[in-house]
């Protein structure tokens, strides 16, 4: 059965959003509210950076986030050298969106946390009319996908990295263009959001991506725990298609915070 152009457009938007969400090719905030990346213990000296092996032991693993599965980042994490941004002030924002540390770190590691499937599409989608097919597709894709990245720094590197992200969110409110893995991506808006109030300091924001005339929002939060940053970038394709609000899942942040205490 032929699908209408509206359904095809939704499918195209889903693929575009999926590429953004899975890193294939969104407040800057203090520990409680947006607007400041400084925490209460900013004066304390940072410890020596953790190694990649140490970070891998600290990042959330399968069975540690109730209601979610944890595994490798689908499609992998793009190399920083491929994340080309015209305005240097926006570079930390792009890095945080695409599962990279906001600034060069001594070591980092990433994993993907996917909400367990809540709904499955009908087995006989061809029997549905266009509207029903579209609704079924949205429901089946209404799943939070979060890439968690841990990065560690020497000295006060983590504080400086978080501050650069905070500054970038403010400077790049009007959007910017990026080329993850060479694919042009247009971010039309960056807006600060309230953070989860965990860790020593945090920055949270929403980035609106426009592809094929459709908009999708990615939510990002970066939290400092001493000299380690925990970054969360979340996309929900079904919610984006339905224009439904969502954010970085609290269970993911809570589970990762518990491992960093």
Image (tube, rainbow, N blue to C red):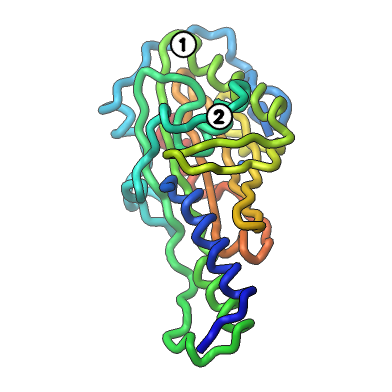
The residue that label 1 is drawn on is: 46
Label 1: which secondary element: loop
Give residue 90's position: percent from left, percent from top: 61, 27
The residue that label 2 is drawn on is: 85
Q: Is residue 243 left or right of residue 108?
A: right
Distance of label 2 from label 1 (alpha carbons): 30 Å
**Marks 2 and 1, the one that precedes in the sequence:** 1
Give residue 19's position: percent from left, percent from top: 47, 52
Residue at horizontal 62%, vertical 30%? 203
Q: Is residue 161 left or right of residue 39?
A: left
Residue at horizontal 54%, vertical 68%? 11
Label 2: which secondary element: strand
Residues packed near mark 2 inside 10 Å, few (<14), some (14 to 19) or many (20 plus): many
Residue at horizontal 44%, vertical 44%? 147
Q: Quadrant of residue 205?
A: top right
Figure quadrant of the C terminus: top left
Depicted 46 relative to depicted 260: above or below: above
Extreme-left residue of the structure: 53
């Amino acid at each position: 059965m032929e699908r209408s152009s509206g359904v095809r457009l939704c499918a195209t938007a889903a693929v575009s959003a999926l590429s953004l969400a899975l890193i294939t090719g969104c407040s800057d905030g203090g520990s409680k509210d947006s607007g400041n990346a400084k925490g209460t213990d900013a004066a304390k000296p940072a410890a020596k950076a953790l190694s990649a092996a140490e970070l891998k032991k600290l990042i959330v693993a399968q069975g540690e986030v109730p209601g979610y599965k944890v595994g490798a980042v689908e499609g992998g994490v793009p190399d920083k050298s491929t994340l080309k941004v015209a305005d240097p002030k926006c570079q930390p924002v792009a890095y945080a969106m695409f599962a990279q540390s906001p600034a060069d770190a001594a070591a980092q590691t990433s994993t993907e946390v996917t909400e367990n499937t809540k709904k499955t599409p009908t087995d006989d989608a061809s029997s549905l009319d266009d509207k029903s097919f579209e609704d079924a597709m949205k429901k089946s894709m209404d799943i939070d996908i979060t890439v968690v990245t841990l990065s560690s720094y020497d000295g006060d590197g983590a504080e400086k990295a978080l501050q650069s992200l905070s500054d970038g969110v403010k400077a790049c409110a009007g959007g910017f263009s990026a080329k993850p893995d060479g694919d042009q991506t247009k971010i039309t808006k960056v807006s600060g959001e309230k953070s989860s109030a965990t860790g020593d300091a945090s920055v949270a924001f929403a980035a609106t991506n426009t592809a094929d005339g459709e908009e999708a929002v990615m939510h990002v939060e970066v939290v400092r725990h001493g000299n380690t940053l925990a970054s969360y970038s979340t996309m929900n394709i079904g919610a984006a298609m339905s224009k439904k609000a969502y954010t970085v899942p609290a269970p993911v942040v809570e589970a990762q915070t518990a491992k960093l205490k």
